[in-house]
Image (cartoon, rainbow, N blue to C red):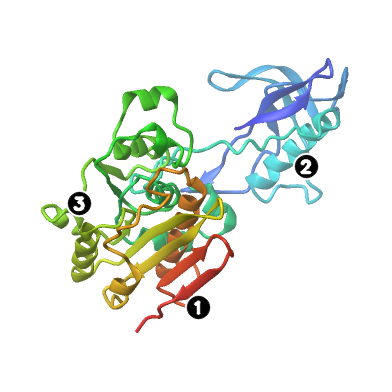
Amino acid sequence: MISNVPYLTAAGDIAKGEVVSELNVSGDTTVPPEPHTVYFTGVPHKAASVPVDEILAGTGTQEPIPGLFAESYLSTKPASGHYADYYEKISQYVRVIAGYARTVDPRATARTFRPIETEDDESPFVYLDSASARAGISALSMRLAAGPIGIIGLGGSGSYILDLVSKTPVPEIHLWDPDDFLTHNAFRAPGAASLAQLSERPTKVEYFASQYSAVHRGIVAHPEMIDNSTLERLDGLHFVFVAIDTSPLKREIILWLTKHGIPIIDVGMGVIRQQDALGGIVRTTTVTPADHAHVERRISFTDEREDEYERNIQLADLNALNAAIAVIKWKKLMGFYRDDLKELHTTYTIATGQLIHSEKPS
């Protein structure tokens, strides 16, 4: 049964009906359709009071499926005399029926792109990833499913990293952040938090887990910060994004992950007021078990500056850019994108628009 097929009624209005066909199978495989006819839940017309006689084989209420009532019986054959498969058969009927509806409204279509809930218990998605299938990259996308990932820090760029990786088939996404989700966070975050949600004052990880569980089943919220006493909770992760402020704790996290063979992408930015406007640099640094000598010279762990970012200026665009560069690099490491340069450190300078890649693998 194909639903939402637009057709012209006897009054010349557009309505929607269902095309109903038998389905012949051999085992779990369909065989060429037989007969060539279908039922339709309306009576299709060319114009007001002008039925589509060339395919109308009969009218009258029938019940081809329990609870579904058809008003017409349609018949049309291809030039070969038979349909090769059900796609050809149903497409032919939909093309004829909907074609007359489009003479009244060119936007009339049976293609509603309705989301389909996945029945695969092993899929991390709530509904089918039709975007990858549509682009023919499903096999490439599965390279991103190598193992669970973690995101440490959801205050800015971390939330945009979640937004991007939640649309990938990673089996689990673990979120760490102890802080509450407040109004100023909402202005840095993807999507739009409601006043009611802000009034409830959820933790950041609980808020984002709730939002993104609508698409991904494997999001796990940890309303705490990773510190020296909880580092072992990162064990078993395949990859970690670090999106926390500069601090000695960041060094401990990165050293522990490197020691335990877990690759990392660390994100950060420095924003200052320059000539009555904002300038600065957005940074993305990749650290792997094989390549980590650049950590001390590229990632700051102590910061005595009070930059404009710390003063809570809203920088959602820079957060999003930082996250996008980080996730693109992660996808390169996973073999999803080509990685000709294999850079480990990328900076974007706001004032000049320069994107600079450096630090090559040893």
- The residue lying furthest to the left in this view is 229
Q: Which of marks 3 and 1 is in front?
A: 3
Say which of 292 and 213 sits in front.
Answer: 292
Q: Which of marks 3 and 2 is in front?
A: 3
Measured as percent of width and height from the top left, residue 304 is found at: 30, 58
Measured as percent of width and height from the top left, residue 82 is found at: 73, 47
Crowd rating for badge 3 (residues with CA inside 10 Å; few <14, some 14–19, many 20+) = many
Q: Earlier in the sequence, mark 3 or mark 2?
A: 2
Q: Disc 3 and disc 2: Cα gap in Å?
A: 67 Å
- Residue type at numbered disc 2: Lys
The reply to whether dot 3 and dot 2 touch (C-beta < 8 Å) is: no
- Secondary structure, mark 2, is loop
Crowd rating for badge 2 (residues with CA inside 10 Å; few <14, some 14–19, many 20+) = some
Q: Quadrant of residue 24?
A: top right
The reply to whether dot 1 and dot 2 touch (C-beta < 8 Å) is: no
Q: Which of marks 1 and 2 is nearer the N terminus?
A: 2
Measured as percent of width and height from the top left, residue 222 is found at: 23, 43
Measured as percent of width and height from the top left, residue 325 is found at: 47, 61
- Secondary structure, mark 1, is loop
Crowd rating for badge 1 (residues with CA inside 10 Å; few <14, some 14–19, many 20+) = few
Q: Nearer the viewer, mark 1 or mark 2?
A: 1
Task: Name the residue beneath numbered marker 2.
Answer: 77
- Residue type at numbered disc 3: Ile
Say which of 261 and 276 sits in front.
Answer: 276
- Secondary structure, mark 3, is loop
Q: Which of marks 3 and 1 is nearer the N terminus?
A: 3
Task: Name the residue beneath numbered marker 3.
Answer: 226
- The residue lying furthest to the front in this view is 275
Task: Name the residue beneath numbered marker 1.
Answer: 340
Q: Disc 3 and disc 1: Cα gap in Å?
A: 34 Å
254 is higher (above) or lower (below) than 93: below
